[in-house]
Amino acid sequence: MEAGNPELAARLQRIDAVDGRKLGLDDEVIGTIVDEQALERAQHAKRRGAYTIVHNGGRLVHFDDHLTMGGVACAMSHRMALEAVAGHPTAAWGLILEDDLAAAAPRAEEAILQVLRQIPRDWDAVFLGYHDDKGAAHPAALEVQDPSEGFGPELRDADVPSVRLLT
């Protein structure tokens, strides 16, 4: 996306992510962010070695939505990005993207431009994601041979973002 839009590239601000490998379920900061029940579920899942996503031959065979340290770190990172946009002294709006977006969703720029053209001016937030509210992959993902190449199993069903809109 940067190569196609030098003006946009000049305005980008990179925010380093929180590393989930450096977090522990018993860290004090986790208790201030994560609901007690969700934390207990995550601890139980970790004790029994539960995976969040299990694939077999490219097909999803099991999904468990318990928290992982990677998930907590991701939420913490997204919060930092949202705070950076909200606290920016001159920006009227912001666009928060993952650093691997182009590899994970090759046509993301097209989808983003389409969304930006359609959103009403009085909306406060637009969230782009890989799945709809029921967890199904966006239909455009079916057009891609192997969108997960080089990525973990959580991206196996991912491609062009679907849109969730909040007013």
Image: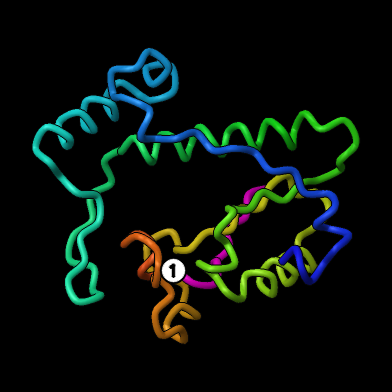
Instruction: Name the image colouring.
Output: rainbow
- Residue type marked 1: Ala
Q: Residue furthest top?
A: 28
Give the structural element (helix, strand or loop) at label 1.
Answer: loop
Specify whether 128 is left or right of 121: left
Residue 119 pos. (x, y %)? 76, 61
Q: Quadrant of residue 40?
A: top left
Return the residue nearer the eye: 122 or 99. 99
Is residue 55 inside the magenta stretch?
no
On screen, residue 104 above or below 40: below
On screen, residue 18 above or below 136: above
Residue 73 pos. (x, y %)? 44, 35
Specify whether 121 is left or right of 145: right
Specify whether 26 is left or right of 88: left
Residue 145 pos. (x, y %)? 41, 85
On screen, residue 167 above or below 17: below
Return the residue nearer the eye: 165 or 139. 139
Residue 108 pos. (x, y %)? 62, 70
Specify whether 27 is left or right of 125: left
Query: Which residue is depicted at the point 39% across and 79% down?
Result: 146
Q: Which residue is mark 1?
A: 158
Query: Which residue is depicted at the point 39% across and 72% down?
Result: 149
Range shown magenta: 158-167
Q: Quadrant of residue 135?
A: bottom left
Q: Quadrant of the N terminus?
A: bottom right
On screen, residue 61 above or below 164: below
Query: Which residue is depicted at the point 17% across and 35% down?
Result: 46
